[in-house]
Amino acid sequence: MALSDRPYGPNSGAASVANQIPLNQQATQTQTLAGVLPVQFTLGAATQTIAPSAPNAAVPLTITIPPATQIEQTVFDLYASGYIQTRAAGTVTIDLYEGTSETIASNVLLGSSGAITQNTAIAAWWAHAGLILDSVSGALVGKIDFYVNKIIVAAVTLSNFPTGFLNQGNPSANPPTMANLPSFVLTFASSGATGGALTTVNIQKFSVG
């Protein structure tokens, strides 16, 4: 197993337990219970677009750390990778956010690749973050780096440090507390994705742990 195969990945977001897709499993051609990855979608405009979930495009592709894990005060990794195919001159930008909202501005930006030139090509990409949190400060901190179209975007500290996280709730507290762990979504933008020059985005891996 590759180091990038982290234990927590996306699920279907289905309402019923019977329809839930197991975490971090590859998808079949029919998008059955085998999983949700890979996810492929197209950009038809230059605007920043949140990656959709394959079984339910109305909700973002999201990964969430479950409560009461051993991640507390331990460095953990987030990996995302795939390819982007552009069909017109322009740039591509990949951003990582903490949150689950379909409204991009409602989430917290963790890092951006910045605009990377990619003209009518198919190119691999990845995003990698090394993160840590603790329930005392409640803050998520760390670093992030990208690799897009043979360009390295060197690791930098997170753009923002979201807070309010708690690894394990205490129902006996007054008032009771509930566990609250980070969730993550990706966004993509392609300045050349206009008219009929669609940009194709493929997410092969998106996992954390």
Image (cartoon, rainbow, N blue to C red):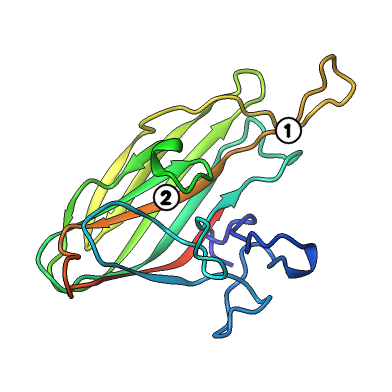
Q: Is residue 204 above or below residue 207?
A: below
Q: Which image quarter: residue 169?
A: top right
Left or right: residue 141 versus residue 32 is: left
Q: What residue do we see at 68% from left, 75% from top?
A: 33
Between the C-alphas of marks 1 and 2, the distance is 25 Å
Left or right: residue 171 versus residue 122 is: right
**Other residues around mark 1 within 10 Å, as few (<14) / some (14–19) / many (≥20):** some
Amino acid residing under circle 2: His
Count of number-bearing discs: 2
Instruction: Specify the farthest residue to the right.
Output: 172
Image coordinates for residue 38, horizontal then vertical, percent: 49, 72
- Look at mark 1 in the image and give the residue it sits on: 179
Image coordinates for residue 142, horizontal then vertical, percent: 45, 33
> In the picture, which quadrant includes the N terminus?
bottom right
Q: Is residue 158 above or below residue 125?
A: above
Front in this rendered view, residue 194 or 5: 194
**Other residues around mark 2 within 10 Å, as few (<14) / some (14–19) / many (≥20):** many
Front in this rendered view, residue 68 or 47: 47
Per the rendering, the mark at residue 128 is 2
Q: What residue do we see at 76% from left, 62% from top?
A: 16
Element class at badge 2: strand
Amino acid residing under circle 1: Ala
Q: What residue do we see at 51% from left, 58% from top?
A: 61
Left or right: residue 29 versus residue 129 is: right
Q: Which image quarter: residue 80?
A: bottom left
Q: Nearer the viewer, mark 1 or mark 2?
A: 1
Image coordinates for residue 15, horizontal then vertical, percent: 71, 60
Q: Is residue 143 visible?
A: yes
